Image (cartoon, rainbow, N blue to C red):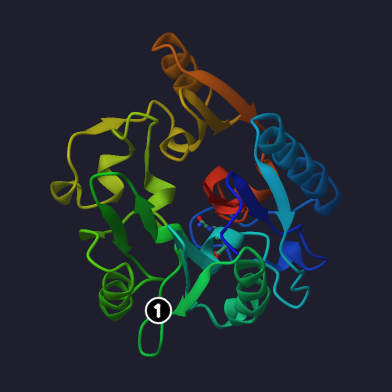
Amino acid sequence: MSAPRRTALVRAPGPRLADGLVSFAERRTVDVDLARRQHDAYTDALRAAGWKVRAVASADACPDAVFVEDALVVSGDVAVLGRAAAPSRAGEAAGAERAARDLGLRVERIEPPGTLDGGDVLQTDRAVYVGLSTRTNEDGICQLARLLGGRPVVPVRVTGALHLKSAVTALPDGSLIGLPDAVDATALPCLRVAPDPAGAHLVVLGPGHVLLAASAPRTAARLAADGLRVTAVDISEFEALDGCVTCLSVLVP
Ligand code: CIR
């Protein structure tokens, strides 16, 4: 079976969400009910843009399981299961593997001593940029490069963010937007500076259409002035846990 087009994998917030890891944000209480409503609005935005939303099985023992992007990377008909460096996230892979198999994807995996979070993998037509971060190591990047069978893979050192895609993402035309001070930008072709920190991470919903966090109003205005359609969603309860719009889904185009 081949993967249905335009499917978005998501995983609903679990009961332990408030215990999620925090490395960059200032630790504060997370309102789990509000997070659930925000997650519903996020999935509604995906559906409204034409994505078929599929739920990944819950992993209630893992507070960060909602950040499903970190569990797997999809490229063509291959799904590469990441390998979490954070011990509390190790239990997230099983449900992600089942979801990938249900979509008819060929499943590969990062093996020890490699570690890799999907949030570090930025795919563009030109190259696959992979963050060398506290979560993704060189061995993980080399394994990913082998598994992606010849696509150019470019490591990018991440110094000021959790993952590469917390700091840099791609616009619909493939150009990059982000925070040059948070990464070694020498490896990146022309990086446009995001007007707000949260404007560094966006999801391409379709041609000329992007999803942004509501906390990036200046970026939204700039991109709209450039002719892009911008959908904004409030994800404050996920931002409190270092999350962003990219990490709440895996898009299988
Ligand atoms: C973590 O620290 O692992 C979670 N609290 C946040 C993960 C965010 N994921 C992402 O940016 N891809």
| The quarter of the picture showing ligand 1 | bottom right
Residue 16: x percent and y percent?
A: 78, 68
- Decide: is 173 above or below 221: below
Q: Residue at x 18, y 34 (%)?
A: 190
Residue 197: x percent and y percent?
A: 43, 36
Tell me the residue that label 1 is attached to. 115
Under mark 1, the amino acid is: Thr
* Quadrant (top left, top right, bottom left, bottom right) of the N terminus: bottom right
In this orientation, which residue lies closer to the viewer: 18 or 250?
250
Would residue 166 appear left or right of 71 to someone viewing this image?
left
Q: Residue at x 68, y 54 (%)?
A: 28
**Can residue 196 be seen in this snapshot?**
yes
**Can residue 158 be seen in this snapshot?**
no
Residue 144: quadrant of the picture: bottom left
Q: Residue at x 29, y 55 (%)?
A: 128
The extreme bottom residue here reads 112
Residue 216: x percent and y percent?
A: 52, 28
In this orientation, which residue lies closer to the viewer: 55 or 89?
55
Q: Residue at x 31, y 60 (%)?
A: 130
Residue 98: x percent and y percent?
A: 66, 74
Give the class, few, some or many, for how many residues have Cα within 10 Å of label 1's Cα (few <14, many ≥20): many
Residue 245: quadrant of the picture: top right
Task: Tell me the element at label 1.
Answer: loop
- Decide: is 33 above or below 212: below
Would residue 227 appear left or right of 216 to someone viewing this image?
left
Residue 124: quadrant of the picture: top left
